[in-house]
Amino acid sequence: MKIGLLGGSFDPIHYGHMNMALAAKGEYSLDEVWLIPAGHSPHKKEEDMMSAEHRVAMCRMAASHYDGIRVNTIEVSSDETSYTYRTLQKLCQQHPDHDFYFIMGADSINYFDHWRHPEIISSLAKILVVNRGEFTEKALSEKFAQIVALFPADIRMVHCDKVHVSSSMIRSRISSNTALDGLLWDDVITYIRQNQLYC
């Protein structure tokens, strides 16, 4: 199977995240996309993040609205610091018959070569870079070429409309008691309110 992997804090998950997943799934005929909520992130303070239990629950609710979108808890179930290369190594061991496609936003490709072991990531998965209009295709193609000059990598572009929403925007709206319509799913909104998250 062709499996797309979309990682993130998902704090909370929103339409923008799903838009990326669906764009990659459609353009590259992926069988499934697995959402991977971050576990012990090397870049964020865990005390500033919602618990893994709540983030996973919201991801599962969001995924339930679409065919071929699943949630994988490999990172939140581990005690290790969550590095993408480690996650991919584990997934390849668990699912040797799958072809993996790692999905990232175009902003992330600018510093991908500074990630922990990007050469391992590129050896285990094709890289799908979602361009939501932030960069020209020429600029991204030049960055792809720079990376490929450093180590072997199969990097491809995903075309995607930009959804003007972010997790920080949602958290701010909740704290100010502003409407969340059009930003995330009704059942996720209900879950957030029932559990008094981000208040």
Image (spheres, rainbow, N blue to C red):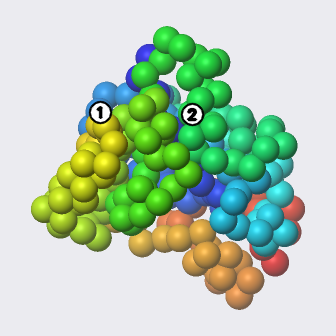
Q: Residue furthest left?
A: 138
Residue 158, x across and y down, in percent: 28, 48
Residue 164, x across and y down, in percent: 42, 72
Q: Which residue is mark 2?
A: 88
Kind of residue indicated by mark 1: Tyr
Q: Residue at x 80, y 64 (%)?
A: 46
Tag shown at residue 28: 1
Q: Is residue 24 visible?
A: no
Give me the C-alpha separation between circle 2 and circle 1: 19 Å
Q: Secondary structure at mark 2?
A: helix
Kind of residue indicated by mark 2: Leu
Vertical order, 1 against 57 (above or below): above
Task: Tell whether 158 sits left or right of 77.
Answer: left
Looking at the rendering, in which quadrant would you find the C terminus?
A: bottom right
Vertical order, 144 against 36 (above or below): below
Vertical order, 184 against 159 (above or below): below
Which sits in the foreground, 193 or 55?
Answer: 55
